[in-house]
Image (cartoon, helix red, strand yellow):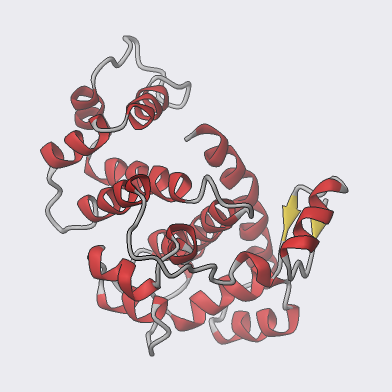
Amino acid sequence: MLAEKVETHAEFVEAREQGFVYFQGYFFRRPEVLATHHMPANRLHYLRRLEAVSHPELDVVKLEKLIKGEASICYRLLRYMNSAMFAFQSEIHSVRHALSILGEREVRRWARLVAAVGAGQDKTSDLPLSALVRARFGELLAPHVPHGASDLFLLGLLSLIDAMLEMTMADVLERVPLDRETKAVLLGRPSVLEPVYQLMLAQEAGEWGRTTRLIEGLHLDAEEVGSSYWQAQPWAREISAGT
């Protein structure tokens, strides 16, 4: 069951108590930034991990130290590597072994997923789930829309990171190296990614008129876009439960 046009926290709680499992609405993309002078250590750790995997050259030694610095992250990585997804003949017991087997692309992807889910795990809304849906939706759209060298999965994943870390987006992006177009669209500046990003938001909010206009402007097939969005939701729930 899908609850549309969820605008407030009270509406979200009410819909969840009524048994809805999917949600759309402005509540899930409204910034919930708190002005604080000191960031809690756990949030700083997630930000450092995002930073570590966002540089062009991946520093595996530094990433290994960050992962080892938190027991729950080590557990998540080893559980991920020993899951049925990989079906290795022998069990993976060390962080270094896991990182060497994953390869650079999957290391970056896994670290970003865990950081995003972890950063929002104490929030009262489904912010991490919404970010994962956007990320997967962007990934499915990527072969069909112009996006240059930008990673649409990463765009979706970071689109709510300000609310999850309770920081301004500008402060977050000072710490996380990103390509120019992704950074621009997340900061509300002109970017070639703007139509794709707006499609993510319109689809999520159930703004079907605006969704249709954006789909037409991007020369996409409406049925394929709808199908991609629905595919993204169970994937996001599975990842959220497993990371």
Q: Report x, y in % for residue 229.
A: 63, 59
Which quadrant would residue 191 be assigned to in this image? bottom left
**Residue drawn at the location 39% of the way across and 72% of the way down:** 169
In the image, is residue 56 above or below residue 148?
above
Classify residue 37 as left or right of residue 30. Answer: left
View extreme (top): residue: 90
**Residue drawn at the location 15% of the way across and 48% of the way down:** 58
Classify residue 30 as left or right of residue 149. Answer: right
View extreme (right): residue: 18
Q: Report x, y in % for residue 63.
A: 19, 40
Classify residue 178 as left or right of residue 237. Answer: left
Q: Report x, y in % for residue 227.
A: 67, 58
**Residue drawn at the location 63% of the way across and 66% of the way down:** 225
Residue 168 or residue 228, whichever sits in front: 168
Q: Report x, y in % for residue 129.
A: 58, 51
**Residue drawn at the location 19% of the way across and 34% of the way down:** 64
Which quadrant would residue 203 be assigned to in this image? bottom right
